[in-house]
Each structure stands twice: as structure tokens, then as C-alpha cells.
Image (cartoon, helix red, strand yellow):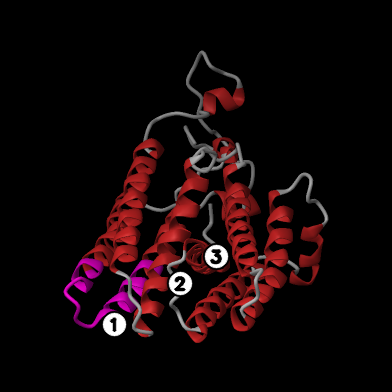
Amino acid sequence: MHPAFSVLIFTVTSGAGYGLLAWLGAGQLLGYTQGYIVAQQLSLGVIAMVLVSIGLASSTMHLASPKNAWRSFSRFRTSWLSREAVFAILLYPVAALYAAAIFLQWHSINLLAGLSIILALVTLFTTSMIYASLKTIRQWNTPMVPALFMAYALISGGSLFLAVNSFFGALNSQLLAVVMGLVLITLALKLVYFFWQGKPQGATIQTATGFSQASVRLLDAGHSAPTFLNREFGYQVAADLLLRLRIVMTLVTFIVPLGLFYWVFDGAGRTELLAVAWFAMMAGLLLERWLFFAEARHVVRLYQGEQRT
């Protein structure tokens, strides 16, 4: 699949924002943010919603006609994209009320924190299901895709949560250990995904054409100029380049942040190290999302001569 830059920005940036909001709400419910000053809590919430807004705004750039984005709300019963749009918009008034509850110390603050967590995670899930529900792309049609989307949001949001708290002088070493554990779990899940992705399975050109008793090969592409299918579904990247990018992505997304987190335990330059860790993780996640698209193989490619999806 052709990796559209606007979609890369959308999924990574909004994911970090939803993850950060979930961490803030969880802190309220579990009690570890009760000692935070109002400015600290509001800063976390504002940063989260700014990231979400940047992501949602960039997603409209992927539309052929952005002015028709409102139509995405009209198919809630049948479309994961429509569900994502509805839940994403519903989050804004809830997040605004949650911010007001923080500022005014309303008694309903726990309720609003819980609603913010639910809407943030539900929106993340609906975004992931836009891809995981596509049976035509084997690399996406797996429960590991929603699991990874949620995990990426939690580790990127958690890393930013630590960095902002460190800026306010309220870094919690136990939370740092929890985020490190989540990064390790996400790394393990991603390695399992890579292993599963490389197993020979799924449709072949024989099953696609129905000629299962003999070898099938393409004699004529059926067109003399590039088409939409070629541009969007026929994206080609050399296998050795993909392998090198996988290694770089793993190092930048997981290994470098883990090393910086471990260094933070020494107590020197905590805010700077945590900020670098978050930026490194975000850069790695952008590369991961590029690979997510570049390595996807739509079954329509079988009719263009590929032997297996």
C-alpha cells in the first residue's frame, strides 16, 4: 500500500494524544495525580488535545475532497471510519468538561476522567479497526493490529506524560518503571507481528483465479499506463531495504527510549532525557507506520502478476 504522509501523521500524533489523555485520566482515578498542581494537569490535557487535533486535521488532507469530511459521520452502523469520526468529536466536549473540573475542582472530576479514558481508548480502537477489518489485506486483518495501535498510544503518551511531569518536578519512578515495562511488552508484540507477517499464508494467484492445479503467470498487465491500483496498491520496496528499516525502527522506537529511561534513574538531566526519548519514539513510530503501509499487500496485486499476498 502507498504510505500517505498525512495518514502517518494522523495515526501517530493522535495516538500519542489519546494515550496521554488516558494516562492523565488514569492518574486521577488511581490517585497518583492528586498531588499535581492545576497548571500541571491542565498542561497535560491541553497537550493531549493539541496532538489529537493535529492528527485529525492532517487526516482530512488524505481526502480527495476535504470539504466532504462531514460525510464520514453518516455511516455509523456500518463503517469503522464513521465510528472513529463520531467518537473523536464526542471526546472534545468531554475533555473540555474534564479540564473545567480540574480547574474548578468539581465533584464530578472522577466521572469525567473515566469518560475521557473510555472515549480516548474507544476512538483508538475504531481507528485501528479501519485497517484490521480489511480482509483483502492479510497483514492488517489480525487482532495484533488493534493491540499494537493501543500499545503504541500508551507508550508514546506515557513517555510524554513522564516528560511533562518531570518538567514540573513531579517525576514518579514507579510510573517510569511501568512505562518501561509497557515498552518491552510492545516490542515483544511487534516482534511476534513481524514473525507472523513473514509466514507464507493467505491468498495466492492460483486461489485468486481458481486455477489450483497448475502454475499461473501473468501474460499481459491489461493496461499501458499507470493506474490508481498501481499507485495505491502496487507500492514496491526492496526487501533488503525493508529489513534495514525494520531494524532502524526497532532501535529508535524501543531500544533508544529504554536506554534513556534507564539513564533517567540516575537522576541527572531527567527532563531533557525524557524529552529526547519521546521525540525518538515518535520518529520511530512514524517509520513503523510507514512500514505498516509499505509492507501491506492487497489481494488485487494478484491480478497484476504477484504470486502471493
Q: Name the residue under label 1.
A: 272
Residue at the (25%, 63%) spot, across then down: 258
| Measured Cα–Cα span from mark 2 to mark 3 | 18 Å
Q: Which residue lies most toward the front here?
A: 107
Q: Name the residue under label 2.
A: 33
Whole-percent x, y for residue 188 in the image: 32, 46
Q: Which of 179 and 171 is in front in this view?
A: 171
Q: Earlier in the sequence, mark 2 or mark 1?
A: 2
Q: Which of marks 2 and 3 is nearer the N terminus?
A: 3
Q: Which residue lies most toward the left here?
A: 266
Within-10-Å neighbours for mark 2: few <14, some 14–19, many 20+:
some
Q: Mark 3 points at which residue?
A: 18
Looking at the rendered structure, the kind of residue marked 3 is Tyr
Q: Main secondary structure of the magenta part?
A: helix
Picture layout, residue 50 above or below residue 300 = below
Q: Of helix, strand and loop, which one carries label 1?
A: helix
Q: Which of 75 and 154 is in front in this view?
A: 154
Q: Which of marks 3 and 1 is nearer the N terminus?
A: 3
The boundaries of the magenta stretch are: 260-282
For residue 3, the mark is none
Looking at the rendered structure, the kind of residue marked 2 is Thr
Using residue 139 as the reference point, say whether residue 231 is left or right of it: right
